Image (spheres, helix red, strand yellow):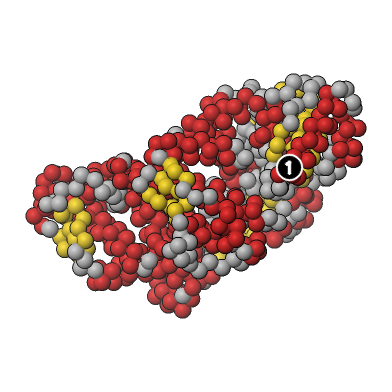
Amino acid sequence: MNKHSLLFLLMVIASVTVFGQDNKDVLLTIDGTPVYASEFKRVYKKNLELVQDESQKSVDGYLDLFVDYKLKSAEAYSQDLDETRSFKREFREYQEQLSRNYIFEDKVTEDLAREAYERGKEEINAAHILIRVGYDAVPQDTLKAYNKIKEVRQKAINGEDFEELAKQYSEEPGAKERAGKLGYFSVFSMVYPFETEAYNTKEGEVSDIVRTQFGYHIIKVMDRKKREPKVSVSHIMISDNVGTRTFSPEERINEVYAMLQQGKSFEDLAKQYSDDKNSAVKGGKLNPFTKGELKSTAFEEEAYKLEKPGDVSKPIKSEFGWHIIRLEKKHNNPTFEDEKQRLENRVKDGSRSKIVTMAVNKKIKNKYGFSQKNNYAPFFNDFVSEEVLNRKWKYDTLSPSQDKTLFTIGDKEVKYSDFAEYISERQRRIRLSKSKYSVLNDMYDEFETQALKDYFREVLERENEDYAAVISEYRDGLLIFDLMEKNIWTKAKTDSIGLQKYYSENKQNYKWDRRFEAEIISATNNEIAKNAVKLFKKGKTGEEIKTLLNQDDKINVILTTGTFEEGERELPENFVSKKGISKIYEQNDSFIVVAVNKIIPAGIKPLEDARGSVLSDYQNYLEKKWIEELRSKYKVTINKKVLNRVKEELKA
């Protein structure tokens, strides 16, 4: 189970709010800390339908779950798990996500996503000229670069050849060879300021000067054209993970392709042979995509070569294995609503995120009040050594006279020492730079943004009941996940002696069904399957039969060999398990014959074969014992009078 799945389950057990508590209605205490009846009732009513165990649907049964949850939460704080770097990082990420709606961050994001949608309808063919200058350059160098690009732009406006100007003046690597040509690009392909200027420039014209982190640019737009729409395809994939194969993936895909050419159903072949399990059950169908959305250019290019629905590619090789691709549909352009979520995700991850950040910061400053008391630069440029560029700057403390107020947000003062601690921590993750000035400038922008959002969330949790309840759920759920990982899951994985002992005491719970050492022939028709049966009965091996029946480059049979447990996918449905040659089974438009060479009786699995199941059960066993220890460690007192009143109110 992954972390997010478990957090959901933990929040099913308990959902906490700090509002509206009646201090007289204390349902229970844990080492004197009260837990209120109103909290329990809200949680019980909210989550009752999600509880699967009938015994836990009563108030008493659910109360046991709730107490266990509270004990784990108390133990997590006892072990200081709320102070770990990993907890703080993940909890901050969730705070960031949850608070977005409350500071209208999503509205700014949606506006930028809509802009990206409109731009994404076109591809632009452009060239550019770059004069390099960083944001950390001294003013003299910045002015020099600006004057140079201004002069080059005037030459271009006056009609001088743009390619020749690019070769002569552009400081982009390879400019002399490429003459500044960028080819066709669309939305999200370039940094946002560059993209914006390109889309705002008419075909055949030269743009205004635009500055990016690389320097000053001018852009000439040569052509614009509509982007290609999405396509839907199906595929059959044979993985080339050779370590798990008893056959050649290339040979297998060619066999499948030959069967397809002989009239076999694409869907049936996908279900039977494709290693892409998610699409195989759907006859090979993939979700619609456009160029650049998959992790395989080779696959995309081949898919877009197909012209009409039903067209099928020859076998092709990608990063994932071998494929046969069939075109299902060429789509019309999607609506904004269709693309909204994907575009918003791109906005959050790319250079547009700075636009969002600036808008949000301004909103928080206006709402609560912001006052810059001192400029960080004069002090920190001297205080922080060049070692910060190597991520090795050491921070101790600031004297009271040094620890001035940097800025205020609402009623909160942010001090120099807060920024110094941030630099000390953040330097581990900074991108390498040659300039201390640039590093400190970037860090200050990040620090101010974080301080503004932290203040906003602090106020929000005090004032907004809904936000406080949800954020508290997640905080406790995340802590309990870390607690379980430390005290149960990691222990179970590393305690080889304990795992072996548990297995020895419970090995009857881990058994194989009957297994078969077998050769499986899948034939294209019943007559060929009958021939395979005859050849098996004459003592021929599967390989020999495959050679005899696949003649003249025509694939009539596919062979699969190995040891198969009863009910495995490779065996036909309703397989009658006995040694020897089976009857012919018809399945997925194939005719299957199984030659069982050996039957291995059902029996106890060795630990190595059962390790996954044993480990899961051992973890449950350790957790049960651990909960008993927590119930001994913490004093839990139930208020019977309040509990009876809760039962009466809930009628459970």
Can residue 616 be seen here? Answer: no
Residue at (46, 60) in percent of width and height = 403
Position in image of residue 384 (x %, y %): 59, 62
x%, y% of residue 4? Answer: 45, 51
Q: Is residue 429 left or right of residue 122?
A: left
When the figure is inspected, residue 355 is found, relative to residue 401, above or below; the finding is: above
Lateral position of residue 196 relative to residue 446, left or right: right
Residue matched to label 1: 142
Q: Nearer the viewer, residue 196 or 93?
A: 196
Q: Amino acid at mark 1?
A: Thr
Crowdedness of circle 1 by 10 Å Cα count: few (<14), some, many (20+)? some
Q: Does any portion of residue 640 appear in the rendered image?
A: yes
Q: Quadrant of residue 165?
A: top right
x, y percent for residue 378: 58, 54
Question: Which element is circle 1 on?
Answer: helix
- The residue sitting at the front extreme is 401
